[in-house]
Structure formats: C-alpha cells, structure tokens
Amino acid sequence: MPLLVVAAALVDRDGRVLVQQRPPGTSMAGLWEFPGGKVEPGETPEAALIRELHEELGIDVEQACLAPAVFASEPLGDRHLLLLLYACRKWRGVAEARHASALRWVRPLELHRMEMPPADKPLIGLLEALV
C-alpha cells in the first residue's frame, strides 16, 4: 500500500518558493522540504493539503487555488511514497513555522543546493519550468 503524501509549492510574487526545515526528533531532521503531509483515510489529496497548510503554516488556501503540478515516487523503507506536489500562488494569511524549525523563501534554482528528502529532489527541475 503506497503512502500518499501531498505538498505545496507556494510561489510568491517574486517567483520564490517556500520551503520548511524538518524539526529535530523527526525522520530526516534538518532537511528542507515543501510544506504538506500525509493524506488521511477518507480525505482527498486537496483536502489533506488545505488542512496541512493550515496546521503547519497557519495559512488558508482555497481548493481552486491548488494546481496539480508534478509527482514523485520513491521507496521508503517497507512502504512506497507517492508525493503529489501542487503549485499555489494565492492564500490568506502569513506563513509561520508552526511545526518546522525554520521557513525560507528561495528561488527554484537555489533548491539544488539545499539538503532535501530524496522524493523532493526530482521535483526541483520540473518546478523550475513551472515558476
């Protein structure tokens, strides 16, 4: 059974993307990732992402503002991770690090130099083309 995870590439007016740093005590602590999380049973990917963005960053996103962008498929221990990345250019509120160690707005090109989870890496090139 694949582990379904959703994430958002929040893109600001300057074409920068928001990444968050995984906190100490979590798997892959210290790595930078796109905000998001697991899809719970009975949830649609979009509903899960809206919930996760509110919980993690304190922002509100409308489903119509989530554009499916790219996906990644990666073995993860005894499971298989399927990561769906959505692009989002419109939200309400100011993103704050509620569960992450830090937040950074970066140009897509800068993502190549950041330490990110294996599933996030293949998304960078495609994200550069979209932004």
Image (cartoon, rainbow, N blue to C red):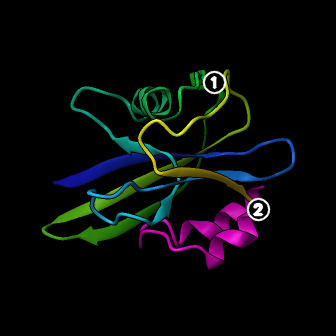
- Give the side of residue 44 with respect to residue 95, left or right: left
What residue do we see at 65% from left, 66% from top?
126
CA–CA distance in space, label 2 to label 1: 24 Å
* Disc 2 secondary structure class: loop
**Quarter occupied by the C terminus:** bottom right
Look at label 2 and name its amino acid: Arg
* Residue closest to the far left: 78
Residue tagged by mark 1? 64
- Give the side of residue 130 with respect to residue 88, left or right: right
Where is residue 46? Give x, y as percent: 46, 31
Where is residue 57? Give x, y as percent: 53, 33
Look at label 1 and name its amino acid: Ala
User: From what the image shows, is residue 113 above or below residue 47?
Assistant: below
Quadrant in the rendering for residue 75 = bottom left
Residue tagged by mark 2? 107
In front of the other: 117 or 40: 117
Q: Verify whether residue 121 appears in magenta.
A: yes
**Quarter occupied by the N terminus:** bottom left
Where is residue 115? Give x, y as percent: 51, 74
* Disc 1 secondary structure class: helix
Q: Which residues are magenta?
A: 107-131
Say how many tags the image has: 2
Quadrant in the rendering for residue 27 = bottom left
Where is residue 34? Give x, y as percent: 53, 53
Please state which of the two labelled residues, at mark 2 or mark 1, is closer to the viewer: 2
What residue do we see at 50% from left, 58% from top?
33
User: From what the image shows, is residue 68 above or below residue 91?
Assistant: below
Mark closest to the chain's N terminus, 2 or 1? 1
- Give the side of residue 32 with respect to residue 90, left or right: left
What residue do we see at 41% from left, 73% from top?
118
* Residue closest to the far right: 14
